[in-house]
Image (spheres, grey):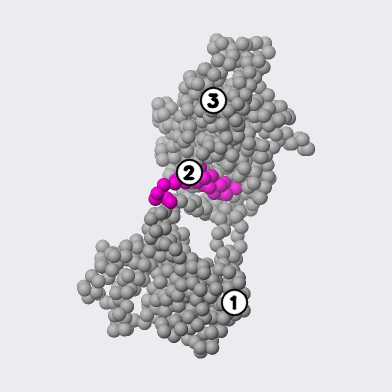
Amino acid sequence: MNIFKVLSEQEVQKLHSASLEVLNAIGLKIASEKVRKMLEEAGATVDHKTTLVRFPPNLVDESIKEAPQRVIYGARNPKYDLVLEPGGETYCRPLTGAEGYIDVETGKYRMAKMSDVKDWARLVDALDNISYCAVPYPDDVPADTRDIRVMPVVLENTEKHILLQPYSGEHMECMIELALAVMGSEEELKKRPILTVLTSVLSPLQLEEYATDIMLIAGKHGIPVEINSAAIAGGTAPVTVAGVTLLSHAEVLAGIAIAEIANPGAPIVYRPLPLFLDMSSGGVLDATVENAMMAAAQVQLIRETYGIPTNMFGQIADALITDGQSMIERVFNTLLPALAGANIVSGAGSLEHTYTLDPVQLVIDDEILGMTYRMLRGFEVNDDTLGLDALARVGPGGNFLADKHTLKYFKAEYFRPHIFNRRSREIWQSEGERDLNENARQRAITILREHKPSPLAEDIVNELDSIIKRLEQG
Amino acid sequence: MSLLDELNTSVMEGDRDKVEELTRQALDQGVEVKTILSDGLIAAMDVVGQRFESGEMFIPEMIVAGEAMTRGLNILRPLFKESGIKPQGTVVIGTVQGDMHAIGKSLASMMMEGAGFRVIDLGVNVSPEQFVKSVKEEDAQLVGMSALLTTTMPAMKATIEALKEAGLLDKVKTLIGGAPVTQEYADKIGADGYAPEAATGVQKVKELLQALRQVDKTI
């Protein structure tokens, strides 16, 4: 499959040099004194009073070149290990940190619970096209430590790699402790980190202390960091598509530079998330057609400059419910960055910008992703795939139903969704006239009833428990 | 693995030559024709049918398994009478007059053959007279008609009328199928059955022929 390009060569250059210029001429406010001092030593211009740090282009360029182009996302079960590299496979994870949840039994909206975290992780574990796990943040545990409290639950309910959003450097340390309990040693964890964390630049052009703390601590232990920037066009960024693309790109570059200056070679994933301010409501939009274009442009931009792994929003919707709108939004937003060569297109299961997760949507996203991966695989054109021999065997007026060429290829050539209605109207009617959502719901319920990830060893579970108990005791 | 188990596996895997070889071997070893048929061939196709229903097996695999089964069946067929086996019915099938579309009809035909029926496939553009002639010659119990075009659907009606005029409708069932065909249309023209999908037509054939009491349920 040929790579899809949104930008011309000149536009890539223009955006690239403009981003370096933003970091050089305007700079970022960086809250952490430790980080400011580190950057000063590395050659940045720092005003400790205003906290403004300006980055010489060379410093940004040289430090980002330290970031590995190949990043491993390890998993509790090694068969789920992911390799992020230029031209490599495309992966997906669900949205992280949503607080709203659609109950799979009633179809009603409510706040997420810890039991949903468990269910969600098991669904992710069972769905083939969801590569790794991120979960809702529940409201039935203390809010200030729920980022950590979900971790043992996720570890127990999926064998896949997991992503979390730590609230602080201290929480990052605690997550590393939990990850070590599973992996056994620092060395193993570094080799196959089972955990990735997400942290954000605050637009426009500010980095809070917790964000840099997380980057530095994660980097030290070889835990990959997805660096995020959610610049809002017309609100916290210039209103134009080019302007918000530029700002969120520049902000993520600053984050990567800092992570690499602190720990050269630290695994980083580029993850800008440019947004739009809805000028009729004042709300923030995540899933416009412009978002899709920007994601594709940013993938191209980073691929043609630094070649480090990318994670773009894909299965995303401004729609509040799993309906036609949510499908249109997520298909545009998944397909464009995927075709541009994104390593990860994420957001599976999400609705309502980034506030809500729906198991039904997750099961449907598994199909959208299956189709996306199939499209990315393209098709081979050679003597055998052209079927010339088969055509000669069958000849005019014959059929290929049981030809050996058919038997050889029919499975691998075509993607078969689990939940699409493709039968005749009569069969559909006789089976209860179920629509896509209902088929997805039934599949989710079946998975939740039947799927059991292999359990963690008892001593590991006990260790995770005791770490959480210590956390509870403060 | 016992001989019959091996025969079973060979049918499921669509190994045509092996099925032929094993069927002969079973006869040589004195296994009863009825046993070879039911435990070796039909039992395998039942499993294939279940796997097809559950989505584990697909049309090409089912057809190849059916072809393998037919190879075994062809060896046994001449021995049916002396073994007291009533053959699975005979089906005459074709795309109706004026319609040149073969694939749906061919698929249905191959699936029926795979289910153990004797299938006379008349091809495409089959006139009512050809259907009538074939039913008489082959002593068929079922006529399958296919049409892809709305404009050729009336030929189904004409065929049923021709069968009626020839006095055959009390001994032969009619089954229609094809993209534009509906149950409503089947009722309207007096067809005995309608199959919404080529791949599921086999089930209809079984139902209709059982209704005719032409089928020995043991096979």
Residue B8 versus residue A451 in the image, above or below: below
Looking at the picture, tell me which residue is in the foreground, A278 or B103.
Answer: B103
Badge 3 is on which residue? A305
Structural crowding at the residue carrying mark 2, measured as other residues with C-alpha within 10 Å and reported as few (<14), some (14–19) or many (≥20): few
The span shown in magenta is A361-386
Q: Amino acid at mark 3?
A: Thr
Element at label 1: helix
Residue A72 percent coordinates (x, y): 45, 32
Direction right: furthest residue: A280
Q: Which mark is residue A377?
A: 2
Element at label 2: helix
Task: Please report the residue visible at 55 percent of the width from the left and 34 percent of the height from the top.
Answer: A311
Q: Earlier in the sequence, mark 3 or mark 2?
A: 3
Q: Quadrant of residue B47?
A: bottom left
Task: Please report the residue visible at 39 percent of the width from the left and 80 percent of the height from the top.
Answer: B216
Whole-number angstrom distance, CA of label 2 to CA of label 1: 46 Å
Badge 1 is on which residue? B154
Q: Amino acid at mark 1?
A: Pro
Q: Chain of mark 1?
A: B
Whole-number angstrom distance, CA of label 3 to CA of label 1: 66 Å
Task: Please report the residue visible at 42 percent of the width from the left and 76 percent of the height from the top.
Answer: B120
